[in-house]
Amino acid sequence: MRLVLTENLEKDMKLAKPIYDNGKILLNRDVKNLYKYKERLLQLGIYNLYVEDKFSYDIEINPTIRDSTQRRGKKVIKDTFDNISDRFFDLDVKELKGIIDNISSELILNEEVLLNLVTLKKTSDYTYEHCLNVSVICITIGKILGYSQNDIFKLGMGGMLHDTGKALVPEEILNKPSSLTEFEYTIMKNHSELGYQFLQTLNSISPLSRIMVLSHHERVDGSGYPRGISGDDIHPFAKIAAIADVFDALSSDRVYRDKMPTHKVLEYIMNNTETLFDYQIVKKILPKISFYPNGSEVILSTGERGIIKEQNTGFPTRPIVRIIADADGNEDIRELDLLKHMNIVITDVLS
Ligand SMILES: [Fe+2]
């Protein structure tokens, strides 16, 4: 299996994972002649797909969480947002708790496995998918840092709810396709405070999850909001939420910009430790995240084109690459272990 841009679909590719639209299957696994659906998929905001072809039949991509958990999670978050925007104060968090338990048990983390945090998103469902992903990333970080199961649960809940204040921000500001005016931005920035105040009424939500809602836009140098607090004044749970929030936001296609590939997102986070993000947390999580996830199409410094086949544990920037074309674009299928060829680097990611 490998990841391709929808616009680069070719004749010999078949679908490796079903595509859903509003919870219903739009295209089933193994659909052939996939390229015929190119325009329709792009119209739906589906810019990447998992496909199988002669280059990738034996490449494995382990999903971070089950597709069914992802779909259910998205629905539960959407319902939560709807309830909050209707000012329905008697929020039932039972479903949310169930989803967080599922994510937590599905995320099997051991020393040998590097995490693939790439998920496919549709721009139209951005807010709900973003909340779910932030929850997944928060839980992952909690596990890497060795937190207790209880704390991991609170991290997952805080991640899930971190942007719920957006349900109280006017729709025309929330979904504005162009950049916000200063006034609109001030209203938008209110979401962390609004979400926090709303959740104050719910005793079933831990104060630690609530602090993530309030403080996920605080930055370690004090440049964040709403309070502009810095360093140790920011709770570690909020620092984790900040990293997870930015990681997922930059990894997502938005109306106003294309998503960044994982290694660029990680570079951005690394380059901003001590100013924006907590250095100690970033340092511990980086060796555990695949810079170039399995199935990504890449260009090497030799000019060759390839697909990431496997990770080398502990060396997230040096995976094993299946070369598919030489520098002149001629088909040339062979394996190249970047750990054994330290002079060759990945120069670009195509999918
Ligand atoms: Fe936010």
Image (tube, rainbow, N blue to C red):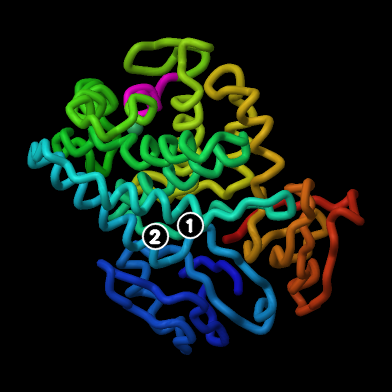
Q: Find disc 2 in the rendering and name its residue.
A: 70
Q: Can residue 181 be seen in this snapshot?
A: no
Report the magenta residues as a range. Answer: 211-218
x, y percentage for residue 51?
54, 76
Classify residue 223 by image quadrant: top left
Q: Is 264 displayed left or right of 235 in the figure? A: right
Q: Nearer the viewer, mark 2 or mark 1?
A: 2
Q: Residue at x 43, y 40 (%)?
A: 153
| Residue 111: image location, x then y, percent | 73, 49
Q: Quadrant of the C terminus?
A: bottom right
- What residue is rendered at 73% in x and 48% in y? 316
Label 1 belongs to which residue?
A: 119
Instruction: From the top left corner, tell me how far across and down residue 131 is, in percent.
Output: 36, 44
Left or right, residue 272 beside residue 309: left
State the CA–CA distance, disc 2 to disc 1.
10 Å
Label placed on residue 308: none
Regarding residue 111, the answer to whether it shows in the image is: yes
Task: Give the residue drawn at x 26%, y 31%.
Answer: 180
Which three-letter amino acid code belongs to the residue tagged 1? Thr
Camera-nearest residue between 161 and 21? 161
- Among numbered discs 2 and 1, the one appearing first in the sequence: 2
- Check whether the beta carbons of the residues at disc 2 and disc 1 lie within 8 A of each other: yes
Q: Amino acid at mark 2?
A: Gln
